[in-house]
Image: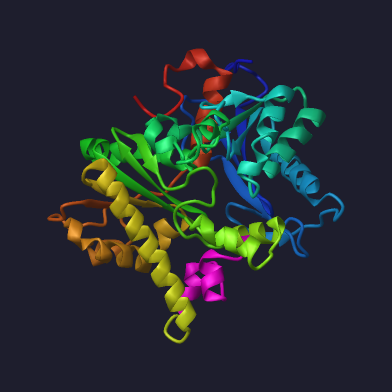
Amino acid sequence: MTIDRTDTRGPSLILVLNCGSSSIKFALFDTASDPPPRQPVWNGKVQGIGGEHPDFGETGVTPFGVSLDPAQPYRCALDLILQRVHARLGDGRLAAVVHRVVHGGSKYFAPVHIDTDVLEDLRGYIPLAPLHQPFALEAIDILLRERPDLPQMACFDTAFHHTVPQVEQMLPLPYDAWERGLRRYGFHGLSYEYLSIALPERHGEQARGRVIAAHLGSGASLCAMRDLRSQATTMGFSALDGLMMGTRTGSLDPGAVLYLMEIERLSLEEVGRILYHESGLKGVSGISPDPRDLLAVEAREPRARLALALYVRRIVREIGALTAVLGGLDMLVFTAGIGEHSVELRRRICEALDWLGMALDPEANAAQATTLSTPDSAVRIAMEPTNEEWIAARHALDLLAPSSSQRPQIGPS
């Protein structure tokens, strides 16, 4: 399908869906220009799906409670979004739905049109991303059955890291594990792909040098980039690897997992729950997975203080390791919820890296500026809000009208 830009029925719009276990984020982008405008026409989310008090929120409107059938709350949430999208369209039309899909495995390195065969392939990657993959696929499945006329696409969080060398992809397991697809894939690729476009626009040629991007949110990872392409990343085979996160462990001695199962006799399900849901900031602090909550009480709560110290230490350690892989560092970039908004954690991380000649400007940091370093800093420190939804919409437009652009599908040239 190609977009008819003379369609008299009104503007064509692309709907981007980012489906999580308890929330669905959505954004509508206009297709009138290529690439589409970076700010959506409309966006919001349904959150608390499966809980007692789900709500619907959209830009500029106070969230309000909604009623979802407890027998199928996810389907009801998706139906609600589609109803409101169609009410919002007016005389426009929905050209396509594009989904952020966390895992493309070893097969999908670029955005794709989705059909039943692709859906079946993607179901095979659910064990690699059990917190995220099933929910995107549920939304895809519903739409394939109920709106077979509506084009659907998938953009993969693993795709951006397809450029890393094999030595970074491999796990030190018997070689046949590599042949079966056990490898380091990397995640948060849509976020890093956006940075690969936005950073040179703002910082020029320096962004093409040795860059480490820190995507710090409830999930967290680092990406080492050179010439705007991924060279290494901290998340690997699964979204459990690398940095300490809100509720996930990050890198962990596999012997500790064996101990939990062999000595403490925990089941596979119990260990999975600990690793994904009960560890990280929440597990160490015993209070919250949100660093804002911990920063507010660390003066009187030793475990909150310890959790934050460990969180920063793990980030600093991994930045040091990736700096060694790059052979030096020209720029450190913070993005995602914590990276974009936590003045204090940025300060702690940068102060621990002053041995790199990194100098944070306190006033720029407090003002949430896009350049956070002093003029004499040996490493430029930056903050860049991510825009994963726009990257997905951009790829969808390419798939809908491939002749309209010669852009490569993974990262800039």
Q: Position of residue 192 (x, y in %)?
A: 42, 41
Image quadrant for the C terminus?
top left
Would you identify the image quadrant in which residue 48 lies?
bottom right
Within the magenta stretch, is there residue 291? yes
Q: Nearer the viewer, residue 80 or 208?
A: 208
* Residue 372 versus residue 152 in the image, above or below: below
Residue at 60% across, 58% down = 276
Within the magenta stretch, is there residue 310? no
Q: Nearer the viewer, residue 365 or 291?
A: 291
Q: Nearer the viewer, residue 165 or 192?
A: 165
Residue at 38% across, 34% down = 167
Would you identify the image quadrant in which residue 63 lies?
bottom right
Residue 164 visible somewhere in the drawing: no
Q: Residue furthest bottom?
A: 300
Q: Which residues are magenta?
A: 277-296
Is 265 situated left or right of 175 in this image? right
Q: Position of residue 37 (x, y in %)?
A: 47, 34
Image quadrant for the N terminus?
top right
Q: Position of residue 217 (x, y in %)?
A: 49, 56
Residue at 47% across, 47% down = 235
Prevalent SS, magenta region = helix
Residue at 61% across, 42% down = 128
Q: Position of residue 83 (x, y in %)?
A: 76, 41
